[in-house]
Amino acid sequence: MSETTDVTEHAIFVSEFERRVNELIAWAVATSPKHISPLFTHDFETVRKNICKIASGGSDAPHRELEPAEGGPQYINDNPAPWP
């Protein structure tokens, strides 16, 4: 698979992801119980920005190691070496 195809697929994914997040926010605002404390679109702005940042690959979270099924090692020796 070419890098251009990967970039295009990722852009399509991010676009669809943002659309669905926006639909979910609109649904939450439209169906929230109005008598308690009504929700507004701006209530979700920080959440929307953060989740879309993660989807686009801009997360500040540390990268995780691959699981064995993903090609990672079966065993990682994390015991310290003995003193000489």
Image (spheres, rainbow, N blue to C red):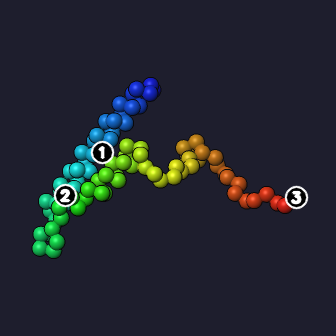
Q: For the residues marked 2 and 3, what is the alpha-carbon distance in whole angstroms? A: 62 Å
**According to the image, label 3 marks what residue?**
84
SS class, disc 1: helix
The amino acid type of the residue labelled 1 equals Phe
Q: For the residues marked 3 and 1, what is the alpha-carbon distance in whole angstroms? A: 54 Å
Check contact, mark 3 vs mark 1: CB within 8 A: no
Depth-wise, is mark 2 or mark 1 nearer the camera? Answer: 2
The reply to whether residue 67 is in sight is no
Q: Is residue 37 left or right of residue 45?
A: left
Check contact, mark 2 vs mark 1: CB within 8 A: no
**According to the image, label 2 marks what residue?**
41
Of pointers 3 and 1, the one earlier in the residue sequence = 1
Q: Residues within 10 Å of mark 1 (few under 14, many from 20)?
A: some
**According to the image, label 1 marks what residue?**
17
The amino acid type of the residue labelled 2 equals Thr
Where does the N terminus fall, quadrant-wise? top left
Of pointers 2 and 3, the one earlier in the residue sequence = 2
